[in-house]
Image: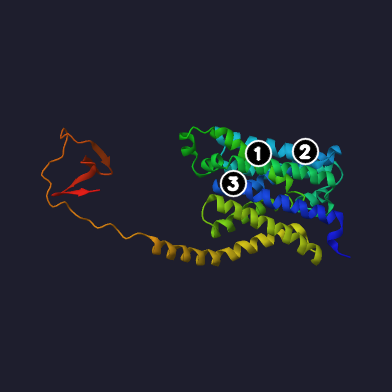
Amino acid sequence: MDLLAFAFIQRALLASALVGLSAPTIGTYIVQRRLSLLGDGLGHVAIAGVGLALMTGTAPLPWAVAICMVGAILIEALRQSGRATGDVGLAVLFYGGLAAGVLMASVAGQGAGGLSSYLFGSLNTISPSDLWVVGGLTILILVVALGLSPQLFALSADEDFAKTLGLPVRVYNYVIVVLAAITVTTAMRTVGLLLVSALMVIPVAAAQNIFRGFWRGMWGAMGIGLIASLGGYLASIYANLAPGAMIVLITIAFFIVSWPLAGLLHRHWHRNQDATDPLPAVHEPVAEHVHVHGPGCGHDMVRHGDHIDYIHSGELHSPHQDHYDQH
C-alpha cells in the first residue's frame, strides 16, 4: 500500500512544506543581521514553554509560542538598551531556557525523555489541530516578512541608514525577533527545536552562494527549504530514518553543492559583464577655451567630486591643469 495514502503522512508533508517555506524567509533577515545563532537561543527558550505545558497538562504549542515571543522581546530590549550584548543575551536564553524546560518536565514526571519529540521533531505525530495552528502561523510569518520586505531589508542591511530614511527602527527590530520566535515554535514538530536554526540559516547561505540580489536570494532560500523539507521527509519514511535530521542533512548537501556552483556562476557573470561593459570614453581636451571660469564669471557652478564643473552653453566643463574637460 502506498504510504502517501495515510492521513498522518499527508499532514506531515504539508507541515514540512509550510515550515520549509517560512523558516528561510525570516532566516534571510536573521543572516543579513549576522544573528545566525538567534534561532538556537530561541529554540531553547521554547523548551521552557514545552516544559511548562507538560507540567500543567496543556497543549505545548501555544505555551511555546508565548514564552518564545517573550524571550525574543526581552533579548531585543536588552540589546537596544545597551545593558547586554547580543551574544550575552543569547547565552542567557540558551542555558536558562533549556534548564527551565528540563526542570519543569522533571516536575511533570516525564524528565528529559518527554521533551525528545520537541527537541528533534516528530512529524508523524502532528494532529489536524496542530496543522491548523502551523498553517495559520506560517501565513502570518509570510505575510509580514514579505509584505514588509523593503523596510526589513533596509534595517537588516544598515540600521543607521534605515534611521535616516525615517523608519521606526525599534519597532521593526521587534518585528524581526518576534517573527523568528514564531518560526522556531512552528518548526519544533518538524525538525525539532535543536535543529530549527539549521533550516533558518543553511538554505539562506546556500541561496546567497547561487543567486544575486536580495529578492532572488530570498526566493531561492525558500525553494531550497521547501525541497529539503519535502525531500527529507519522503526519504525518511521510505528509509525509516529520523525526518528532522534527514531534512537538515539535505539542506547541508545543498550548501556543499552551492560552493563549486557559485564559482562557476561567478565566472560566468564576470564574463558576461566584461562583454557588455562599454568602452571607456575618449579623453578629448578642449583645444581653445578663451573664457576663464571662476567665481562671478556668469556661469553656474556645480561641485563634482574634487573639482568644480561650470555649465557653459548648456554643457559642463571643468578646469583640469591647462585645459577644460568637456562632460
Quote the CA–CA distance across marks 3 and 1: 12 Å
What is the quadrant of residue 202 in the picture?
bottom right
Q: CA distance from mark 1 to mark 2?
A: 15 Å
Q: Which mark is residue 178?
A: 1
| 155 lies left or right of 184 | left
Closest to the camera, between mark 1 and mark 2, is 1
Residue at 61% in and 40% down? 147
Q: Is residue 290 left or right of residue 27?
A: left
Q: Amino acid at mark 2?
A: Trp
Which residue does the numbered mark 2 point to in the structure image? 63
Q: Residue furthest left?
A: 290
Which amino acid is tagged 1? Val
**Residue occupying image coordinates x 69% and y 45%:** 183
Tell me: 39 left or right of 165: right
Could you say which quadrant of the image residue 104 lies in? Answer: top right
Amino acid under disc 3: Ile
Q: Which residue is mark 3?
A: 30
Q: Is residue 288 visible?
A: yes
Residue 125 is situated, as x and y percent measured from the top left of the image, at: 84, 52
Which dot, 3 or 2, sits closer to the camera?
A: 3
